[in-house]
Structures are given as C-alpha cells and as structure tokens.
Image (cartoon, rainbow, N blue to C red):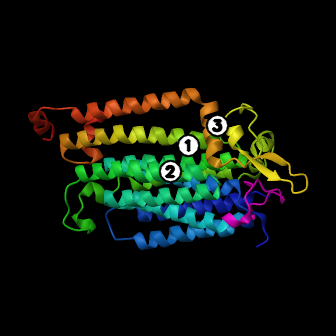
C-alpha cells in the first residue's frame, strides 16, 4: 500500500466524485417522470459541480472556486423558488406531477 | 502503452456501473434492485481499490496539498454521497428522494471539510439542507396525492416506472466515461504549470497584497509575542481563516457579481409571488385535463 495514489488524496479523487454526482443527476433528470424529482436532480448536478469547484480551488490554492460556489448556491436558491412555484402551478392545472402529462407541448 | 490498463479498468468500471444503474432504475418486471445495489457497490469499491494504484504519475502525484489524514474521510463521504445520489434518482417516493438528497448534501459538506473549505461546508448545510430542501418539502406536501402505504404498488405509475432508463443510463455513463478519461489522464494530471503561479500567493499566513495597509483587518489580524528579556512586543500577522479569505475574495474581486446576485434573488422573489398568484379559470383546467 505504498502506492502514491492510495495514500495521497489527489485532485482526481474529488473530480471523480464530482463527475459521478453530476452524471447521476443527469440520468435522473432524463429518466424520472416526477417534476419535483426532476428539479431535485438538477440540484444534484449542482452538487457535483460544487465539489469539482472546491477541489480545484484547493488544488490551485485559489479562493475563486469557493466564492463561485456561493454564486452557485444563489442561483440554486432562485431556481428552486421559481421552479417549484411553476411545479405547483402545473399541478393545479392537471392534478398530476407526471411530466408526460405535458407531452402535448412537444407539438 | 502504459496508460492502457488504466483506461481499460476505467471503461470496465463504467460499463459495470451503468449495468448496476439500469438494474436499480424503477421499471416493470422482477425486482432486480438488490443485484443492482450489490453490483454498484462492488464496482465502486473495485474502482477505488483496483484502479487507483494503476494510476501512477511516476511518483509525481498532482495532490491537493493535503496530508493523508483526510483519506479515509474522503472514501466514507464519497461513498455516502454517491450511494445517496443513486437512491435519490431511484426512489419511488419524492419525499424520500428529498431526504436522501439531504444526505448527499451532508456528504459533500464533509468532502468540503476534507478540502479545508469549512465556510462553504457550513453554508452548504445551512442554505441547501436548511432553506432549499425545506422549500422542496413544502412543495412535495402541497402537490402529492396521499398514499395508502409505502408499498411501491400503491404509488402512481409515473413514480414507479422510469422513462427510458436504459438509454438515459447509457447516455449518462458515456458522458462519465469521457469525463473520467480526462480526469485520470496522467498527462493532464501532471500539469504543474497550472499550479505554480498561484501556489505561493495564498498559502501561508501572509497578507493578501490587495488588502489596504490600514483598515479593520490589519489592526485585528496581528498577534503580539512578548520578548521576555527586552520587554518588547513584536507583532506578526495572525492566521487568516477560511471565512475571512472567502470574504476578501468575494467582495474585492467580484463586487459587481454580488450586486447582480442580489438583483437575481429579488427578481426570483417577485417572480415567485407572481407565479403563486396566477389564477386560471376552472373550466379551462377541466377542459385541458380531458
């Protein structure tokens, strides 16, 4: 176990975790049909990006990455307020959270 | 070609992970979730303990400057985060998906602590785990029909069955394979040129050169040490905490972005009120639901 990568925390460790979180959020957004869970999956993608940003911030010893996470949190909060308001509106119209109920919008 | 076993192991792990994901997705047919969970956990563990030793950069590891103490915490938090994320996208009830998402947030806050970003870890828990997830919980309570039990068979169809789980997983893991190819590319990871210019600027307990010589920070952030023989006090800069660093960076480098973030928050507040007050005639909703 004297191999460098197992005994050292490397940048790639955190990039791996961030990438997996992002991809899981992407899969969930594509395949789930519940509108609320779809927006939860966008937050999951934000998490992956945040982990990547903080890891790069640590790697370069530059605090811009961490401050950018603050802006990501801001946008996530604004997006949650607006998107969830829209979800409630859509639910009142069709009485279901199924995204396929709105598939006639495809035209 | 030295990189070949690494890339091979990466792609095998990606394919196995995709297979586990397909098995875990909610879909009609026999319940394959235990097999999927086992396969997924085995893939993740195998990737970490088989792949990582293969990735050698000739002893010149592009590390994050952390000692080895954070390593077990990285593995624990990372596993919790990934497992909880899988549960978020596979659970058939949105309430539980939201609660598992809280677990993802706590795990990534732990990862931030390992990365010595304690302010961001706390902000993440407070803003995400506190504010945003409470909003989600309220909407889930408002917009979900009551269920008889936790049994998946009682859930509506759109919760129980994913839409195109196979192709979604294939697309997602294709992206993951491409990302990991570059993340684990030794040639990219050894890029010390990117690290060098900022390396000496922040590390240590020096002042940021952009901080004015007079001001609150300068006066507060000195510690005096008393010389016993001469009786003189020598002043030195005190260690600057992570929160102070982020505050300086935030307000000195991005003042315009702060203002814009405030405008965005105000606009979303107004927008949320407008959306919440939107009325639509009742007969239209009846007609559109037919």
Q: Residue at x 87, y 57 (%)?
A: B228
> In this picture, which residue range is highlighted in magenta?
B53-70
Point out the residue furthest to the right here.
Answer: B229
Q: Residue at x 66, y 36 (%)?
A: B216
Q: Residue at x 29, y 50 (%)?
A: B138
Q: Chain of mark 2?
A: B
Q: Earlier in the sequence, mark 2 or mark 3?
A: 2
Disc number at residue B249? 3
Disc number at residue B124? 2
Label 1 near label 2: C-beta < 8 Å? yes
In-front residue for pair A77/B154: A77
Q: Which residue is mark 1?
A: A69
**Percent x, y of residue B287:** 11, 36
**Percent x, y of residue B172:** 50, 51
Specify the quadrant of the image occupied by residue B30: bottom left
Tell if the residue under mark 1 belongs to the same chain as the one under mark 3: no
For mark 2, give the secondary structure: helix
**Number of numbered labels in the structure image:** 3
Q: Nearer the viewer, mark 1 or mark 3?
A: 3
Label 3 near label 2: C-beta < 8 Å? no
Classify 10 Å Cα crowding around label 1: few (below 14), some (14-19), many (20 and above).
many
Point out the residue furthest to the top here.
Answer: B256
User: Does residue B110 sit above or below B190 in this rendering?
Assistant: below
**Percent x, y of residue B88:** 41, 58
User: Does residue A93 sit above or below B140 in this rendering?
Assistant: above
Classify 10 Å Cα crowding around label 3: few (below 14), some (14-19), many (20 and above).
some
For mark 3, give the secondary structure: helix
In-front residue for pair B130/B10: B130
Q: Residue at x 23, y 53 (%)?
A: B144
């Amino acid at each position: 176990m004297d191999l460098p990568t197992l005994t050292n925390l490397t940048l790639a460790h955190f990039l791996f975790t961030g990438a997996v979180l992002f991809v899981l959020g992407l899969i969930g957004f594509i395949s789930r049909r519940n509108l609320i869970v779809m927006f939860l999956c966008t937050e999951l993608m934000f998490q992956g990006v945040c982990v990547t940003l903080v890891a790069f911030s640590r790697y370069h010893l530059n605090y811009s990455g961490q401050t950018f996470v603050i802006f990501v949190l801001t946008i996530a909060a604004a997006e949650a307020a607006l998107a969830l308001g829209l979800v409630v509106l859509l639910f009142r119209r069709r009485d279901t959270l199924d995204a396929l109920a709105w598939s006639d919008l495809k035209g | 070609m030295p990189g070949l076993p690494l890339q091979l192991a990466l792609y095998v792990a990606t394919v196995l992970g995709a297979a586990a994901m397909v098995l875990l997705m909610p879909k009609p047919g026999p319940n394959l979730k235990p097999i999927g969970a086992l396969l997924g956990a085995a893939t993740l563990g195998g990737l970490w303990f088989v792949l990582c030793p293969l990735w050698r950069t000739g002893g010149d590891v592009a590390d994050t400057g952390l000692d080895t103490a954070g390593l077990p915490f990285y593995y624990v938090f990372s596993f919790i985060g990934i497992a909880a994320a899988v549960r978020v996208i596979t659970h058939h009830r949105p309430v539980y998906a939201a609660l598992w998402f809280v677990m993802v947030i706590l795990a990534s806050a732990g990862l931030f602590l390992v990365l010595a970003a304690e302010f961001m870890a706390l902000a993440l828990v407070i803003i995400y785990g506190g504010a945003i997830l409470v909003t989600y919980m309220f909407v889930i309570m408002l917009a979900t029909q009551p269920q008889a039990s936790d049994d998946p068979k009682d859930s509506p169809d759109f919760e129980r069955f994913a839409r195109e789980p196979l192709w979604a997983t294939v697309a997602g893991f294709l992206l993951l394979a491409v990302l990991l190819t570059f993340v684990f590319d030794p040639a990219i990871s050894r890029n010390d040129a990117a690290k060098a210019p900022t390396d000496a600027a922040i590390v240590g307990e020096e002042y940021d050169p952009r901080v004015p010589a007079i001001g609150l920070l300068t006066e507060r952030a000195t510690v005096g040490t008393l010389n016993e023989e001469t009786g003189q006090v020598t002043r030195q800069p005190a260690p600057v905490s992570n929160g102070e660093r982020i505050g300086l960076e935030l307000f000195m480098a991005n003042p315009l972005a702060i203002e814009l973030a405030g405008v965005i928050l105000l606009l979303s507040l107004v927008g949320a009120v407008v959306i919440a007050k939107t009325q639509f005639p009742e007969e239209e909703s009846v007609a559109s639901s037919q």
